[in-house]
Amino acid sequence: MGNKQAHLPAGTELRRWVRLRRRFNAPPERVFRAWADPEELARWFPERVEGALAVGSRSVLVWPDRRVWWEVTQAHPNGSFVFRWPWLPDETLITEVRVMISPAGYGSRLELEDGPFPLDAPGGIDAWAEAIEGWSEALATLHAHLDFSVDLRPRG
C-alpha cells in the first residue's frame, strides 16, 4: 500500500506553523521556569522528564503512552526557550518550538510557534492538526498550573 501523499491544489502554501498567544498572571520568571526546569515542566506537561533541559542537551519527556525526545537549542531566562522534537514515530518530521515570553502588566505574554509542518510530506497534515490541538490543550493546562495551581491532566 505505501505512503499516502497529500494532493493539494496548486499554489497551496506547503509549509505551515502553529502559532499561539496566551496571557498569564504569572511573572515571566515563573513562566520561563515552567518550561526550563524539569520538575516544573513535569507538573503540567509530561508525566516526567528524563535528563536536564540545558542548552545542547537531549532529554526524554515521558507520558503514560509515549516517550519523546527534546533537544534544547536556546534558553534565555525570562525571554525565550527553544527546542526541537519529532512529531512522527519514524522521526522523519522534526519541528522547532519557539516559546517567547515577555512582561505584560503584572503578568506575562507567551507566544508559541511550532513548525514547519510540510503539508505535502507523508503524515504532515495530520501532525500539523495534532500540533494545533495538542498545543492548545497544553497551554490551557499551563494556564491552570501557573495562575490557579491546578493540574488539569487526565488521571489514569
Image (cartoon, grey):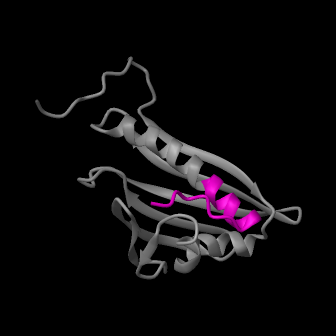
Residue in the picture at 55% in, 79% down = 39
Of the pair 11 and 148, the residue shown nearer to us: 148
Magenta residues (range): 139-156
Tell me, yes or no, whether the highlighted magenta stretch contains residue 143. Answer: yes
Residue located farthest toward the right when viewing the structure as drawn:
105
Which percent across, then down, holds residue 95?
A: 41, 54
Tell me, yes or no, whether the highlighted magenta stretch contains residue 129. Answer: no
Of the pair 3 and 47, the residue shown nearer to us: 47
Q: Quadrant of the C terminus?
A: bottom left
Q: State how many labels appear.
A: 0
Residue located farthest toward the left when viewing the structure as drawn:
1
Which percent across, then down, holds residue 134?
A: 50, 48
Residue in the picture at 38% in, 18% down = 10
Residue located farthest toward the front when viewing the structure as drawn:
156
Residue in the picture at 57% in, 55% down = 138
Which percent across, then down, holds residue 40?
A: 59, 76
**Is residue 91 depicted above or below 27 in this figure?**
above
Q: Quadrant of residue 76?
A: bottom right
Residue 118 placement, left or right of 102: left
Residue in the picture at 48% in, 78% down = 53
Which percent across, then down, holds residue 68?
A: 36, 63
**Is residue 72 depicted above or below 14 in this figure?**
below
Residue 75 placement, left or right of 11: right
**Is residue 90 depicted above or below 69 in this figure?**
above
Q: Quadrant of the N terminus?
A: top left
